[in-house]
Image: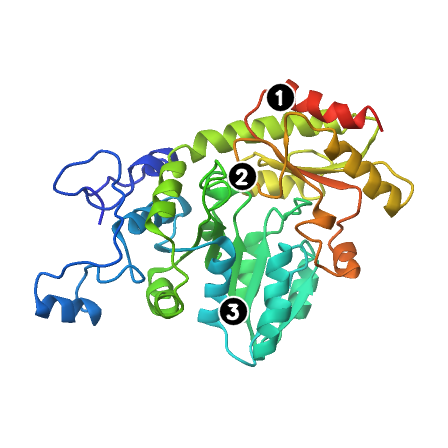
Amino acid sequence: MSQQPLPPNLHVDTLAVRAAVDRSQYGENSEALYLTSGYVQPSAEAAAARFAGEEDGYTYGRSGNPTVSSFEMRLAALEGSEAALATSSGMSAITLMLLSLLKAGDHVVFSQSLFGSTIKLIGSEFARFGVTSTSVPQTDLAAWQAAIQPNTKILFAETPTNPLTDVCDIAALADMAHNAGAWLAVDNCFATPILQRPIALGCDIVTHSGTKYLDGQGRVMAGALCASEAMVKEKFLPVMKNSGLVLSPFNAWVVLKGLETLDIRMKAQSANAHALALWLQDHPQVQRVHYPALPSHPQHALAMKQMSNLGGAVLSFDVKANDPEQARARAFHVLNQLQVLSLCTNLGDTKSLLTHPASTSHGKLAEAQRQAAGIGQGLIRVAVGLEHIQDIQNDLLRGLDSL
């Protein structure tokens, strides 16, 4: 369903601007936005065949849309997966995956450093329906192996993690999952397919919050699952049709156009983040910087191998403090002095966004869960944007130098 058969072995930045569904009869160069909830059928016979899944064709907005299909095709091409399925948000993509693959009595092993809402979804919401789970330290392969049970169906990791940028060995976890008859799912939100392609490392399912770097400008919400064509068609698509976890055509079009600049944005923002990390680690009020491209990062070598020798656009740092109460106050002080950068819990924007994870994204977790994940009260996360690096540094200095 491409505009014309694309030659093999195209580079990822070419696929980001060329993979899409057929042009319409009007020959538009920029992919069209199809705002419709229904489709006129050429005949009663064709309608019956399409609704039965015996013939390709669009039937209803909840089942498919040409603009949404373009986004799915493009993302699958970038991730190197056979297929992709778009959803209304990143969390709806994870919900769809779990609904499609699990039943009462099944078990999930997941990283204790997953996004807070993901932890609550697996550990609390799905527990109500008889799905059990075990959380493990992100980087401890022995702990992952020990947690696997005969009824384990999914291993779920996020790499790098939010907000401490812990990195896991995708290939090792894939082997572990497959030896146990389970699937490995990887949240690739931070690295994106520009830096990291988990499918090529043996992963079965890649989850995305398109709200973040895929869009890149903080405009809409979107999500996606990338997997084999069989899994998408036989597992995910039927549940999506019945649950309605679908992406709107307009949001799909926005993210589709965002993908066209994903390559240059990720490389430029990664360069900015690396420069900021190097600068922050030398500031006297900073206790520690968490960033995969720093040699001090515990998984530095693995990160450089898996992430195209780049560290990504997200880092976090701990301000120096004597106790958790003082750490929280000092972190809040730094954030409250910002005049250029944004105090915002989102990430993936061209604008630099800062947040205090312990009171926002991970604020609903129990203190023990936060401590297990290493998220202290003095931690500040920075999703580095495209501002000039000196302006980013100067804005942080307003708070750091006045502590």
| Distance from the alpha carbon under mark 2 to that under mark 3 | 31 Å
Identify the residue at image location x=29%, y=47%.
67
| Distance from the alpha carbon under mark 3 to that under mark 1 | 44 Å
What amino acid is labelled 1 in the image? Ile
Quadrant where the image shows the C terminus: top right
Is residue 308 visible in this depiction of the protein?
A: yes
Identify the residue at image location x=76%, y=57%.
372
- Secondary structure state at the residue bearing disc 1: helix
Identify the residue at image location x=59%, y=49%.
159
Mark sitting earlier along the chain (1/2) = 2
Residue 389, which numbered label?
1
Q: Where is residue 107 drawn, in percent x and y? A: 59, 74
Residue 182, which numbered label?
3
Residue 348, which numbered label?
2
| Distance from the alpha carbon under mark 1 to that under mark 2 | 17 Å
Q: Are marks 3 and 1 in contact (CB under 8 Å)?
A: no
Which quarter of the picture shows residue 278?
A: top right
- Secondary structure state at the residue bearing disc 3: loop
Q: How crowded is mark 3: few (under 14 residues within 10 Å), some or many (20 or more)?
A: many
Is residue 383 visible in this depiction of the protein?
A: no
What amino acid is labelled 2 in the image? Gly
Mark sitting earlier along the chain (3/1) = 3
Query: Looking at the image, is 313 positioned above or below residue 66?
Result: above
Discs 3/1, front = 1
